[in-house]
Image (spheres, rainbow, N blue to C red):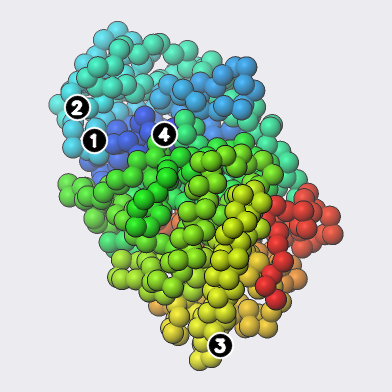
Amino acid sequence: MSTQIGDYALLSDCQSAALVGRNGSVDWWCAPRFDSRSCFARILDESAGHWAIHPAAEFESQRSYVTDAMVLRTDFHTADGTVRLTDALLLSADPHSHGHHLGRGSPHVLTRLIEGLSGTVEMRLESCPRLEYGLTTPGLRQAPGSIDTVGGPDRLRLTTMKPWQIGDDGCASLDLAVEAGQSYSFALIHCDGMTGADPEAVDIPEAIDATITGWRSWSELHRGYRGFAAQEVRRSALVLQALTFQPTGAIVAAPTTSLPEIVGGASNWDYRYGWLRDSSITLKALWIAACPDEAERYFRWMALASGSGGEEHVQIMFGLQGERDLSEHRLEHLRGHQGSRPVRVGNDAWKQRQLDVLGEVLEAAWILREQLDFDDLTTRFLWRLADDAAQSWQLPDSGLWEGREGQRHYTNSKLMCWVALDRACRLATHLRASSRLRSWGKARDEIAAAIMEHGWDDEAGAFTGAFGSHHLDAAVLLMPLVGFLPASDPRFRRTMDTVQRELGDDGLLQRWTGAEEGAFVICSYWLAECLALAGEVDRAREVFDRVGARANDVGLLSEQVDTASGQLLSNFPQTFSHAGLINAAWAIEQATSDQGTRDRKDAPWAGSPIG
């Protein structure tokens, strides 16, 4: 069993996701959506289901993604020979779309192709479906060419070229001797357990080739960035696409739930939803990676999900089709990843007041202003956010990091309210909001004055995490990134130095003073951006490289990193982390030359600092 988060690679059909370990075991798969109940969940409990394919004898493995595709190849090397395993969640892209509509109408089929490369290798295959997060052990019914699950809310059909052994434990197993030149293919097809029709047969090698073609067609359309760390940016852009729920354009924060921030700890959350907070950072990354259609669809999803309002505060996150009620409950029967309990489904953060999202969304609208359709729905949505910022900025909230210990006057929340009103003023013509311009501008200036007076702490020698607090928070690094202060401002330079000294470890930053967790990946990328803006390009590259070195062997990043062991922590892979990588790479590229792939002065989010 893969025991560490970094042992996994991501498979996606742009509607759901699976995680497969270095050892060839699929230990997580939710279908038909990212947030569906799982079919395999061994990553959360040894008994919660898996589908393993690996040599029976001792082996070493090497793996990589097929170029420009989210299709995984793992080579198993044994004393007797080498076998290649190719894994994919199939796409069913419109053949006439040339990659524009990747993953729409995906068939929810997990395919695995074994090919002998040299010698003869004895392979061991084991399929143990455990439906509904391991609550249901279905029966297995074998017929010529297939094995069906019987019972439970989902139905799985495993297509096979050979008969398997069915055990009393609800597992099926198969031993294969694979010679050089031989190949064996398998498909696991998901459908509704009660009413679904019999699934159609799949030509697996042909379907895998079509899936590779689909990914590569999408990649070919999105090659606008050719600057610093181009390969890493391209992989991260693919990850963002893989985490996009194509039917609506929503982007999940991560495809997993309850992977721990601290191994053995209780900070285990469900990230399989779309956060409004992620919008400006992710949209900026999509713009850099030349993915404008994806950015616009993501924004449209936010506007449609938020609707006309009427609530006490703007909801900060939604389900993939705009669902509002994401009530949280615990799966007490699961032991959690490496004993990290509780395992949670749902996320009660949907009830919190988080003022920073107001600025994130209006910043996103500013980024997209040249291509966004400012129709009645969009303008009402943005008016509401700006009015909320003007009226609510003096209130305490739960903050960027969604603390559950109570509300405070977080500096970053005030900063993002300033962003909301600054961008609303800049967008006043688009929003047909000249009548609001004076009140929005007045509130914006009041917020700026409050931040400068109450956000700065002489004792800390820095802008701190909350008004009246001595504690540091890496979120203040956003100040120059949103144009509030230049990176060269003396107060900000002192803040940046203090944050690096007090929260840093080998270039990796924790979120706040005294945090009992790993380093937070995007905070380090924010630091790299700030250093680049301050002209410290060599130091920015050093920080960027130190963070990138913590990615796993196929280039994936989680939310956090254990600085002592290098182990990846928390939900995985993380949208925030990969968007942060793209944005930091672009900042370094711009700081390196007068003319990079895109000119900073023409960047859609560029604006004058307040001075």
Whether 527 is drawn above or below 192: the answer is below
Report, in whole angstroms, how far the alpha carbon at label 2 lies from the one at label 4: 19 Å
Q: Which of 173 and 91 is in front in this view?
A: 91
**Do labels 2 and 1 touch, CB within 8 Å?**
yes
Amino acid type, residue under disc 1 in the picture: Glu
Earlier residue among tags 3 and 1: 1
Q: Is residue 528 shown left or right of residue 19?
A: right
Residue in the picture at 64% in, 54% down: 427
Residue in the picture at 24% in, 17% down: 195
Report, in whole angstroms, how far the alpha carbon at label 3 lies from the one at label 4: 46 Å
Amino acid type, residue under disc 2 in the picture: Gly
Q: Identify the image quadrant of the C terminus.
A: bottom right
Which residue is disc 2 drawn over? Answer: 152
Earlier residue among tags 2 and 4: 4
Earlier residue among tags 4 and 1: 4
Report, in whole angstroms, how far the alpha carbon at label 2 lies from the one at label 1: 8 Å
Callout 2: helix, strand or loop? loop
The image quarter containing residue 165 is top left
Residue in the picture at 62% in, 36% down: 293
Q: Furthest residue to the front?
A: 435
Which residue is disc 1 drawn over? Answer: 132
Amino acid type, residue under disc 3 in the picture: Gly
Image coordinates for residue 531, horizontal then vertical, percent:
68, 70
Image coordinates for residue 15, horizontal then vertical, percent:
44, 32
Earlier residue among tags 3 and 2: 2
Residue in the picture at 55% in, 46% down: 379
Q: Which of 491 and 166 is in front in this view?
A: 491
Which residue is disc 4 drawn over? Answer: 16
Whether 305 is drawn above or below 124: the answer is below
